[in-house]
Amino acid sequence: MPTAKTSSSKPAFLAFWLALAAVLPARAGAPAADKLLDKVLAPPDLTYSGRTMVTQWFGKQARAEEVDVLIATGGRARRRFLAPDGRVLRVVVSDGETEQVYVPRLHKIYAGDAARTYEKIMPAEKERDLLVENYDLAVSGPETVAGRPTWILQLTPKTPGKPSQRLWVDQQTGVVLENKRFLPERSFAAMSRFVTFQPGAAAAQDDFKVVDASASVMHPAGLEPAFLSLEELNAATGRAANFPEKLPGGFHFESADYMTVGRHSVREIRYTDGLAIVSIFLTDRPVQLPKQGTTFVSTPAQGMSALRLSASGKVLNWRRGREYFTAMGDVSRELLLAISGSFK
Amino acid sequence: MNHDEQALLSAWIDGELSQDERARVEAHLPGCASCRGDLDGLRFVKTRLARADRRAMPPDLIAGIEAAVARPWHLRWFPVLGRSTVLVPAGMVAAAGLIVGLWLGMTNNDPDQFVPLEPLLAAHARYEAEALLPEDTMVAARYSYHLANADGEDQQQ
Protein backbone atom coordinates (compact mmCIF):
# COMPACT_ATOMS: atom_id res chain seq x y z
CA MET A 1 0.00 0.00 0.00
CA PRO A 2 1.20 3.50 -0.74
CA THR A 3 1.08 4.71 2.90
CA ALA A 4 3.02 1.76 4.19
CA LYS A 5 5.56 2.17 1.40
CA THR A 6 6.08 5.81 2.29
CA SER A 7 6.57 5.08 5.97
CA SER A 8 9.07 2.24 5.31
CA SER A 9 11.13 4.11 2.67
CA LYS A 10 11.56 7.21 4.81
CA PRO A 11 14.06 5.71 7.29
CA ALA A 12 15.99 4.10 4.46
CA PHE A 13 16.07 7.41 2.62
CA LEU A 14 17.31 9.18 5.75
CA ALA A 15 19.94 6.50 6.39
CA PHE A 16 21.23 6.90 2.85
CA TRP A 17 21.61 10.67 3.28
CA LEU A 18 23.19 10.27 6.68
CA ALA A 19 25.73 7.84 5.24
CA LEU A 20 26.38 10.18 2.35
CA ALA A 21 26.78 13.07 4.76
CA ALA A 22 29.37 11.07 6.68
CA VAL A 23 31.39 10.58 3.52
CA LEU A 24 30.87 13.93 1.88
CA PRO A 25 32.75 16.11 4.37
CA ALA A 26 35.87 14.14 3.58
CA ARG A 27 35.45 14.91 -0.11
CA ALA A 28 34.11 18.40 0.22
CA GLY A 29 36.41 20.81 -1.57
CA ALA A 30 38.66 18.02 -2.75
CA PRO A 31 40.37 18.94 -6.01
CA ALA A 32 40.03 16.80 -9.11
CA ALA A 33 42.77 14.20 -9.38
CA ASP A 34 44.37 15.70 -12.49
CA LYS A 35 44.34 19.17 -10.90
CA LEU A 36 46.02 17.83 -7.78
CA LEU A 37 48.56 16.03 -9.97
CA ASP A 38 49.39 19.28 -11.75
CA LYS A 39 49.78 20.98 -8.39
CA VAL A 40 52.27 18.29 -7.36
CA LEU A 41 54.16 18.46 -10.65
CA ALA A 42 54.66 22.20 -10.27
CA PRO A 43 55.91 22.53 -6.71
CA PRO A 44 55.55 25.97 -5.11
CA ASP A 45 58.52 28.31 -5.16
CA LEU A 46 58.58 29.05 -1.46
CA THR A 47 60.86 28.67 1.52
CA TYR A 48 60.14 26.11 4.21
CA SER A 49 61.95 23.89 6.67
CA GLY A 50 61.18 20.82 8.71
CA ARG A 51 62.17 17.39 9.88
CA THR A 52 61.48 14.37 7.67
CA MET A 53 61.73 10.66 8.36
CA VAL A 54 62.86 8.61 5.39
CA THR A 55 62.52 4.83 5.53
CA GLN A 56 63.57 2.51 2.74
CA TRP A 57 63.28 -1.24 2.51
CA PHE A 58 65.92 -3.35 0.78
CA GLY A 59 64.68 -6.90 0.78
CA LYS A 60 64.11 -7.77 4.42
CA GLN A 61 66.23 -4.90 5.68
CA ALA A 62 65.02 -1.38 6.35
CA ARG A 63 67.02 1.81 6.69
CA ALA A 64 65.51 4.80 8.44
CA GLU A 65 67.02 8.25 8.61
CA GLU A 66 65.97 11.57 10.03
CA VAL A 67 66.48 14.45 7.64
CA ASP A 68 66.81 18.12 8.48
CA VAL A 69 65.25 19.84 5.45
CA LEU A 70 65.57 23.45 4.33
CA ILE A 71 64.03 24.36 0.97
CA ALA A 72 64.25 27.88 -0.43
CA THR A 73 63.12 29.76 -3.49
CA GLY A 74 65.16 29.43 -6.69
CA GLY A 75 65.56 25.66 -6.42
CA ARG A 76 67.82 25.91 -3.40
CA ALA A 77 67.77 22.98 -1.00
CA ARG A 78 69.69 21.55 1.94
CA ARG A 79 69.08 18.09 3.34
CA ARG A 80 71.09 16.88 6.30
CA PHE A 81 70.79 13.16 6.95
CA LEU A 82 71.16 12.44 10.64
CA ALA A 83 72.10 9.34 12.60
CA PRO A 84 69.93 8.43 15.60
CA ASP A 85 72.51 10.05 17.90
CA GLY A 86 72.33 13.32 15.95
CA ARG A 87 75.55 12.94 13.95
CA VAL A 88 75.42 14.30 10.44
CA LEU A 89 75.89 11.36 8.07
CA ARG A 90 75.50 13.15 4.76
CA VAL A 91 74.55 16.60 3.51
CA VAL A 92 73.01 17.23 0.11
CA VAL A 93 72.91 20.90 -0.87
CA SER A 94 71.89 22.63 -4.05
CA ASP A 95 72.07 26.33 -4.86
CA GLY A 96 69.84 25.81 -7.87
CA GLU A 97 72.71 25.32 -10.30
CA THR A 98 75.23 23.06 -8.62
CA GLU A 99 74.83 20.28 -6.14
CA GLN A 100 77.14 18.90 -3.49
CA VAL A 101 76.88 15.65 -1.58
CA TYR A 102 79.04 15.91 1.52
CA VAL A 103 80.07 12.87 3.54
CA PRO A 104 81.81 14.17 6.69
CA ARG A 105 83.10 10.76 7.73
CA LEU A 106 84.95 10.32 4.44
CA HIS A 107 85.93 14.01 4.18
CA LYS A 108 84.61 13.96 0.66
CA ILE A 109 82.38 16.23 -1.36
CA TYR A 110 80.77 14.78 -4.47
CA ALA A 111 80.01 17.68 -6.76
CA GLY A 112 77.79 17.88 -9.80
CA ASP A 113 74.94 19.72 -11.40
CA ALA A 114 71.69 20.43 -9.64
CA ALA A 115 68.72 18.27 -10.54
CA ARG A 116 66.23 19.63 -13.04
CA THR A 117 68.70 22.02 -14.63
CA TYR A 118 68.73 20.09 -17.93
CA GLU A 119 66.34 19.70 -20.77
CA LYS A 120 65.40 16.07 -21.02
CA ILE A 121 64.82 14.26 -24.30
CA MET A 122 61.19 13.55 -23.48
CA PRO A 123 59.11 16.74 -23.07
CA ALA A 124 57.38 17.15 -19.69
CA GLU A 125 53.97 17.14 -21.38
CA LYS A 126 54.60 13.76 -22.96
CA GLU A 127 55.89 12.39 -19.65
CA ARG A 128 52.72 13.59 -17.95
CA ASP A 129 50.61 11.96 -20.67
CA LEU A 130 52.52 8.73 -20.09
CA LEU A 131 51.82 8.92 -16.37
CA VAL A 132 48.10 9.40 -16.90
CA GLU A 133 48.12 6.65 -19.53
CA ASN A 134 49.82 4.17 -17.22
CA TYR A 135 48.26 5.03 -13.85
CA ASP A 136 44.81 5.53 -12.42
CA LEU A 137 44.54 8.69 -10.35
CA ALA A 138 42.33 9.15 -7.31
CA VAL A 139 42.00 11.72 -4.55
CA SER A 140 41.07 11.02 -0.96
CA GLY A 141 41.35 12.80 2.36
CA PRO A 142 41.71 15.03 4.05
CA GLU A 143 44.31 13.62 6.42
CA THR A 144 46.59 15.44 8.80
CA VAL A 145 50.38 15.27 8.38
CA ALA A 146 52.70 17.29 10.62
CA GLY A 147 49.60 18.98 12.02
CA ARG A 148 48.46 20.19 8.59
CA PRO A 149 45.49 19.10 6.45
CA THR A 150 46.42 17.28 3.26
CA TRP A 151 44.77 15.72 0.21
CA ILE A 152 45.92 12.27 -0.76
CA LEU A 153 46.74 11.61 -4.39
CA GLN A 154 46.77 7.91 -5.19
CA LEU A 155 48.52 6.64 -8.33
CA THR A 156 47.69 3.02 -9.13
CA PRO A 157 49.37 1.24 -12.07
CA LYS A 158 47.09 -0.08 -14.76
CA THR A 159 49.40 -3.03 -15.46
CA PRO A 160 50.66 -5.39 -12.75
CA GLY A 161 54.22 -5.50 -11.54
CA LYS A 162 54.76 -1.76 -11.10
CA PRO A 163 54.88 0.41 -7.99
CA SER A 164 51.92 2.42 -6.80
CA GLN A 165 52.32 5.70 -5.01
CA ARG A 166 50.44 7.78 -2.48
CA LEU A 167 51.18 11.46 -1.92
CA TRP A 168 49.88 13.60 0.95
CA VAL A 169 49.70 17.13 -0.45
CA ASP A 170 49.52 20.11 1.87
CA GLN A 171 46.23 21.83 1.15
CA GLN A 172 47.61 25.30 1.74
CA THR A 173 51.03 25.23 0.07
CA GLY A 174 50.90 22.24 -2.28
CA VAL A 175 54.07 20.78 -0.75
CA VAL A 176 54.15 16.96 -0.60
CA LEU A 177 54.31 16.29 3.13
CA GLU A 178 54.24 12.52 2.93
CA ASN A 179 55.18 10.13 0.13
CA LYS A 180 54.78 6.37 0.14
CA ARG A 181 55.92 4.11 -2.65
CA PHE A 182 54.42 0.62 -2.63
CA LEU A 183 56.23 -2.17 -4.41
CA PRO A 184 54.11 -4.76 -6.19
CA GLU A 185 55.48 -7.67 -4.18
CA ARG A 186 55.70 -5.99 -0.78
CA SER A 187 53.61 -3.84 1.51
CA PHE A 188 55.66 -0.76 0.63
CA ALA A 189 59.23 0.05 -0.32
CA ALA A 190 59.93 3.60 0.72
CA MET A 191 58.38 6.52 2.50
CA SER A 192 59.24 10.03 3.52
CA ARG A 193 57.12 11.99 5.95
CA PHE A 194 57.43 15.42 7.47
CA VAL A 195 57.33 15.28 11.25
CA THR A 196 57.53 19.05 11.56
CA PHE A 197 56.88 21.60 8.80
CA GLN A 198 57.38 25.37 8.92
CA PRO A 199 56.55 27.34 5.79
CA GLY A 200 58.19 30.72 5.44
CA ALA A 201 61.42 29.82 7.24
CA ALA A 202 64.45 32.08 6.87
CA ALA A 203 67.33 30.93 4.67
CA ALA A 204 70.75 32.44 3.91
CA GLN A 205 72.82 31.76 0.79
CA ASP A 206 75.54 30.15 2.93
CA ASP A 207 73.07 27.47 3.91
CA PHE A 208 73.39 25.96 0.43
CA LYS A 209 77.18 25.53 0.22
CA VAL A 210 79.36 22.97 1.94
CA VAL A 211 82.33 24.51 3.70
CA ASP A 212 85.03 22.00 4.58
CA ALA A 213 88.51 22.95 3.37
CA SER A 214 89.89 19.54 4.36
CA ALA A 215 87.42 17.63 2.20
CA SER A 216 88.45 16.37 -1.21
CA VAL A 217 86.09 17.22 -4.07
CA MET A 218 85.12 14.50 -6.51
CA HIS A 219 82.99 14.43 -9.63
CA PRO A 220 81.49 10.96 -9.78
CA ALA A 221 79.58 9.45 -12.64
CA GLY A 222 75.89 10.17 -12.47
CA LEU A 223 75.97 13.54 -10.71
CA GLU A 224 76.41 15.32 -14.02
CA PRO A 225 73.99 13.39 -16.20
CA ALA A 226 73.66 13.95 -19.90
CA PHE A 227 70.45 13.40 -21.83
CA LEU A 228 71.36 11.91 -25.18
CA SER A 229 69.37 10.34 -27.94
CA LEU A 230 70.47 6.87 -29.07
CA GLU A 231 72.08 8.40 -32.15
CA GLU A 232 74.03 10.84 -29.98
CA LEU A 233 75.08 8.01 -27.67
CA ASN A 234 76.33 5.90 -30.57
CA ALA A 235 78.20 8.86 -32.03
CA ALA A 236 79.77 9.75 -28.68
CA THR A 237 80.86 6.22 -27.82
CA GLY A 238 81.67 5.05 -31.32
CA ARG A 239 79.60 1.93 -30.74
CA ALA A 240 76.39 0.86 -32.36
CA ALA A 241 73.69 0.23 -29.81
CA ASN A 242 70.20 -0.67 -30.91
CA PHE A 243 67.59 -0.50 -28.19
CA PRO A 244 63.83 -0.87 -28.28
CA GLU A 245 61.83 2.33 -28.08
CA LYS A 246 59.33 0.71 -25.72
CA LEU A 247 59.53 -1.92 -23.00
CA PRO A 248 56.84 -4.10 -21.44
CA GLY A 249 54.87 -2.32 -18.71
CA GLY A 250 54.36 0.90 -20.68
CA PHE A 251 57.96 2.10 -20.42
CA HIS A 252 59.25 4.45 -23.11
CA PHE A 253 62.80 5.45 -23.95
CA GLU A 254 63.63 8.78 -22.35
CA SER A 255 67.38 9.35 -22.72
CA ALA A 256 70.83 7.77 -22.76
CA ASP A 257 74.13 8.56 -21.11
CA TYR A 258 77.63 7.13 -20.80
CA MET A 259 80.21 7.26 -18.06
CA THR A 260 83.44 5.74 -16.84
CA VAL A 261 83.39 3.65 -13.67
CA GLY A 262 86.91 2.69 -12.63
CA ARG A 263 88.45 1.52 -15.90
CA HIS A 264 85.16 0.46 -17.37
CA SER A 265 83.08 2.36 -19.87
CA VAL A 266 79.38 2.16 -19.08
CA ARG A 267 76.43 3.06 -21.26
CA GLU A 268 73.10 3.85 -19.61
CA ILE A 269 69.68 3.77 -21.26
CA ARG A 270 66.73 5.17 -19.30
CA TYR A 271 63.07 4.36 -19.67
CA THR A 272 60.07 5.89 -17.93
CA ASP A 273 56.36 5.18 -17.68
CA GLY A 274 55.77 8.68 -16.34
CA LEU A 275 56.37 7.65 -12.75
CA ALA A 276 58.73 4.69 -12.43
CA ILE A 277 62.20 4.55 -13.94
CA VAL A 278 63.99 1.57 -15.47
CA SER A 279 67.69 1.94 -16.24
CA ILE A 280 69.61 -0.44 -18.49
CA PHE A 281 73.41 -0.41 -18.15
CA LEU A 282 75.70 -1.92 -20.77
CA THR A 283 79.21 -2.97 -19.80
CA ASP A 284 82.03 -5.05 -21.22
CA ARG A 285 82.54 -6.82 -17.91
CA PRO A 286 79.92 -8.23 -15.54
CA VAL A 287 78.57 -6.02 -12.79
CA GLN A 288 79.42 -7.43 -9.38
CA LEU A 289 76.26 -8.12 -7.40
CA PRO A 290 76.34 -8.72 -3.67
CA LYS A 291 76.35 -12.43 -2.88
CA GLN A 292 73.66 -12.01 -0.26
CA GLY A 293 70.21 -11.94 -1.75
CA THR A 294 71.28 -12.80 -5.27
CA THR A 295 69.47 -15.65 -6.97
CA PHE A 296 69.95 -17.19 -10.40
CA VAL A 297 67.19 -17.49 -12.92
CA SER A 298 67.56 -19.45 -16.12
CA THR A 299 65.69 -18.20 -19.14
CA PRO A 300 66.71 -20.39 -22.05
CA ALA A 301 63.60 -19.34 -23.99
CA GLN A 302 65.05 -15.84 -24.26
CA GLY A 303 68.37 -17.15 -25.45
CA MET A 304 70.21 -15.85 -22.40
CA SER A 305 72.61 -17.77 -20.27
CA ALA A 306 71.50 -16.67 -16.82
CA LEU A 307 69.72 -13.87 -15.00
CA ARG A 308 70.39 -12.69 -11.52
CA LEU A 309 68.06 -10.92 -9.15
CA SER A 310 69.37 -9.08 -6.15
CA ALA A 311 67.64 -7.82 -3.05
CA SER A 312 69.92 -4.79 -3.10
CA GLY A 313 67.39 -2.83 -5.07
CA LYS A 314 65.86 -4.63 -8.02
CA VAL A 315 68.87 -5.45 -10.13
CA LEU A 316 68.95 -7.97 -12.92
CA ASN A 317 72.06 -9.14 -14.78
CA TRP A 318 72.34 -11.04 -17.99
CA ARG A 319 74.76 -11.51 -20.82
CA ARG A 320 74.33 -11.33 -24.54
CA GLY A 321 77.41 -12.24 -26.53
CA ARG A 322 80.28 -10.16 -25.22
CA GLU A 323 78.04 -7.52 -23.66
CA TYR A 324 76.67 -7.51 -20.14
CA PHE A 325 73.29 -5.98 -19.36
CA THR A 326 72.16 -4.72 -15.96
CA ALA A 327 68.58 -3.58 -15.43
CA MET A 328 67.38 -1.59 -12.39
CA GLY A 329 63.94 -0.48 -11.37
CA ASP A 330 61.23 -0.73 -8.73
CA VAL A 331 59.20 -3.26 -10.67
CA SER A 332 58.32 -6.88 -10.03
CA ARG A 333 60.67 -9.71 -10.78
CA GLU A 334 58.37 -10.96 -13.55
CA LEU A 335 58.25 -7.56 -15.21
CA LEU A 336 62.02 -7.15 -14.97
CA LEU A 337 62.45 -10.55 -16.62
CA ALA A 338 59.98 -9.58 -19.33
CA ILE A 339 61.92 -6.34 -19.87
CA SER A 340 65.16 -8.30 -20.22
CA GLY A 341 63.50 -10.34 -22.95
CA SER A 342 63.16 -7.18 -25.04
CA PHE A 343 66.94 -7.01 -25.50
CA LYS A 344 67.46 -9.92 -27.89
CA MET B 1 158.80 -50.21 -37.13
CA ASN B 2 155.26 -51.40 -37.72
CA HIS B 3 153.29 -51.57 -34.46
CA ASP B 4 150.02 -52.78 -35.86
CA GLU B 5 150.60 -55.94 -33.88
CA GLN B 6 150.58 -53.93 -30.65
CA ALA B 7 146.75 -53.66 -30.83
CA LEU B 8 146.56 -57.44 -31.01
CA LEU B 9 148.60 -58.16 -27.87
CA SER B 10 145.64 -58.37 -25.44
CA ALA B 11 143.78 -60.74 -27.74
CA TRP B 12 147.01 -62.77 -28.27
CA ILE B 13 147.29 -63.31 -24.47
CA ASP B 14 143.64 -64.42 -24.33
CA GLY B 15 144.16 -66.79 -27.31
CA GLU B 16 141.52 -65.08 -29.32
CA LEU B 17 143.52 -64.43 -32.52
CA SER B 18 143.31 -66.33 -35.78
CA GLN B 19 146.23 -68.45 -36.91
CA ASP B 20 147.54 -65.80 -39.26
CA GLU B 21 147.28 -63.01 -36.66
CA ARG B 22 148.94 -65.14 -34.02
CA ALA B 23 151.81 -65.87 -36.43
CA ARG B 24 152.23 -62.16 -37.19
CA VAL B 25 152.38 -61.22 -33.48
CA GLU B 26 154.77 -64.02 -32.63
CA ALA B 27 157.02 -63.04 -35.57
CA HIS B 28 156.99 -59.41 -34.43
CA LEU B 29 157.66 -59.76 -30.70
CA PRO B 30 161.28 -60.97 -30.78
CA GLY B 31 162.39 -57.90 -32.68
CA CYS B 32 160.27 -55.26 -30.78
CA ALA B 33 161.25 -54.35 -27.24
CA SER B 34 158.33 -51.90 -26.94
CA CYS B 35 155.71 -54.52 -27.67
CA ARG B 36 157.42 -56.93 -25.30
CA GLY B 37 157.18 -54.25 -22.59
CA ASP B 38 153.50 -53.76 -23.29
CA LEU B 39 153.01 -57.48 -23.23
CA ASP B 40 154.61 -57.71 -19.78
CA GLY B 41 152.26 -54.93 -18.50
CA LEU B 42 149.19 -56.70 -19.82
CA ARG B 43 150.23 -59.97 -18.29
CA PHE B 44 150.75 -58.23 -14.91
CA VAL B 45 147.24 -56.72 -14.93
CA LYS B 46 145.64 -59.98 -15.93
CA THR B 47 147.51 -61.81 -13.23
CA ARG B 48 146.42 -59.32 -10.51
CA LEU B 49 142.81 -59.41 -11.66
CA ALA B 50 142.87 -63.17 -11.65
CA ARG B 51 144.07 -63.15 -8.04
CA ALA B 52 141.52 -60.59 -6.82
CA ASP B 53 138.63 -61.65 -4.53
CA ARG B 54 135.42 -62.46 -6.29
CA ARG B 55 132.00 -61.40 -4.97
CA ALA B 56 128.71 -62.94 -5.93
CA MET B 57 126.31 -60.70 -7.92
CA PRO B 58 123.22 -59.75 -5.91
CA PRO B 59 120.40 -62.00 -7.10
CA ASP B 60 117.87 -59.10 -7.54
CA LEU B 61 120.28 -56.77 -9.38
CA ILE B 62 119.05 -57.60 -12.84
CA ALA B 63 115.39 -57.49 -11.80
CA GLY B 64 115.97 -54.11 -10.11
CA ILE B 65 117.59 -52.65 -13.19
CA GLU B 66 114.77 -53.88 -15.40
CA ALA B 67 112.13 -52.49 -13.01
CA ALA B 68 113.91 -49.12 -12.85
CA VAL B 69 113.98 -48.85 -16.62
CA ALA B 70 110.27 -49.68 -16.79
CA ARG B 71 109.27 -46.91 -14.19
CA PRO B 72 107.70 -43.57 -15.20
CA TRP B 73 110.23 -40.80 -15.65
CA HIS B 74 109.13 -38.79 -12.59
CA LEU B 75 109.60 -41.82 -10.33
CA ARG B 76 112.98 -42.56 -11.88
CA TRP B 77 114.15 -39.02 -11.17
CA PHE B 78 112.21 -38.47 -7.93
CA PRO B 79 111.81 -41.91 -6.40
CA VAL B 80 110.58 -40.31 -3.14
CA LEU B 81 107.29 -39.62 -4.91
CA GLY B 82 106.67 -43.33 -5.02
CA ARG B 83 106.29 -43.50 -1.28
CA SER B 84 102.70 -43.16 -0.06
CA THR B 85 103.80 -41.28 3.07
CA VAL B 86 104.98 -38.47 0.81
CA LEU B 87 102.52 -38.77 -2.05
CA VAL B 88 99.28 -38.58 -0.01
CA PRO B 89 100.13 -35.38 1.90
CA ALA B 90 101.56 -33.85 -1.27
CA GLY B 91 98.33 -34.65 -3.09
CA MET B 92 96.27 -33.09 -0.33
CA VAL B 93 98.36 -29.92 -0.43
CA ALA B 94 98.02 -29.74 -4.21
CA ALA B 95 94.24 -30.23 -4.00
CA ALA B 96 93.95 -27.53 -1.34
CA GLY B 97 96.01 -25.20 -3.50
CA LEU B 98 93.75 -25.89 -6.45
CA ILE B 99 90.62 -25.16 -4.39
CA VAL B 100 92.09 -21.93 -3.03
CA GLY B 101 93.09 -20.94 -6.55
CA LEU B 102 89.60 -21.57 -7.89
CA TRP B 103 88.05 -19.67 -4.98
CA LEU B 104 90.35 -16.73 -5.57
CA GLY B 105 89.42 -16.86 -9.22
CA MET B 106 85.72 -16.76 -8.44
CA THR B 107 86.02 -14.02 -5.84
CA ASN B 108 88.54 -12.01 -7.75
CA ASN B 109 88.65 -8.46 -6.47
CA ASP B 110 90.64 -7.31 -9.42
CA PRO B 111 88.98 -4.03 -10.38
CA ASP B 112 89.25 -5.01 -14.03
CA GLN B 113 87.26 -8.18 -13.56
CA PHE B 114 83.97 -6.63 -12.47
CA VAL B 115 82.12 -3.35 -12.73
CA PRO B 116 81.18 -2.20 -9.22
CA LEU B 117 77.45 -2.00 -8.57
CA GLU B 118 77.21 1.03 -6.25
CA PRO B 119 78.14 3.71 -8.83
CA LEU B 120 75.45 2.33 -11.13
CA LEU B 121 72.88 2.37 -8.31
CA ALA B 122 73.91 5.96 -7.59
CA ALA B 123 73.52 6.94 -11.26
CA HIS B 124 70.10 5.28 -11.42
CA ALA B 125 68.95 6.97 -8.20
CA ARG B 126 70.35 10.31 -9.33
CA TYR B 127 68.37 10.07 -12.54
CA GLU B 128 65.24 9.52 -10.44
CA ALA B 129 65.80 13.08 -9.22
CA GLU B 130 65.07 14.14 -12.78
CA ALA B 131 61.78 12.25 -12.85
CA LEU B 132 58.53 14.04 -13.48
CA LEU B 133 57.23 13.54 -9.98
CA PRO B 134 59.45 15.25 -7.42
CA GLU B 135 60.44 12.87 -4.65
CA ASP B 136 63.48 14.87 -3.72
CA THR B 137 64.21 13.84 -0.16
CA MET B 138 63.58 10.15 -0.80
CA VAL B 139 65.70 10.21 -3.94
CA ALA B 140 68.47 12.30 -2.38
CA ALA B 141 68.60 9.76 0.45
CA ARG B 142 69.13 7.02 -2.07
CA TYR B 143 71.81 8.44 -4.29
CA SER B 144 73.81 10.10 -1.54
CA TYR B 145 73.85 6.75 0.27
CA HIS B 146 75.06 4.90 -2.83
CA LEU B 147 77.69 7.56 -3.56
CA ALA B 148 79.12 7.14 -0.07
CA ASN B 149 79.00 3.35 -0.45
CA ALA B 150 80.71 3.50 -3.83
CA ASP B 151 83.86 4.44 -1.98
CA GLY B 152 83.57 1.21 -0.03
CA GLU B 153 82.33 2.85 3.10
CA ASP B 154 79.01 2.01 4.70
CA GLN B 155 78.56 5.01 6.85
CA GLN B 156 75.36 3.63 8.29
CA GLN B 157 77.31 1.23 10.44
Image: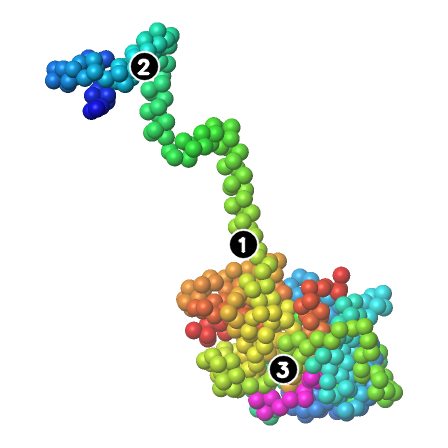
Query: x, y percentage for residue A308?
Result: 53, 63
Amino acid, disc 2? Gly
Instruction: Please say whether residue B4 is one of the residues in the magenta stretch.
Output: no
Mark yes or no: residue A222 visible: yes
At a point 51% along the width and 45% down the height, the residue shown is B98
- Residue under pointer 1: B105
Precedes in sequence: disc 2 or disc 1:
2
Q: Is residue B47 left or right of residue A21?
A: left
Q: Is residue A12 left or right of residue B46?
A: right
Q: Nearer the viewer, mark 1 or mark 3?
A: 1
Q: Secondary structure at mark 1?
A: helix
Same chain for mark 3 and mark 2? The answer is no
Quarter-wise, where is residue A333 in the image?
A: bottom right
Asked whether disc 3 touches disc 2, contact meaning CB atoms under 8 Å apart, the reply is no
Mark yes or no: residue A132 visible: no
Query: x, y percentage for residue A305?
Result: 45, 63
Give above or below for B9 relative to A138: above
Q: Quadrant of the N terminus of chain A?
A: bottom right
Give above or below for A300 relative to A215: above
Residue range (magenta): A113-123
Q: Secondary structure at mark 2?
A: helix
* Label number found at residue A225: 3
- Residue under pointer 2: B41
At a point 37% along the width and 30% down the height, the residue shown is B71
Give whichever of A49, A226 is nearer the camera.
Answer: A226
Query: x, y percentage for residue A344?
Result: 43, 73
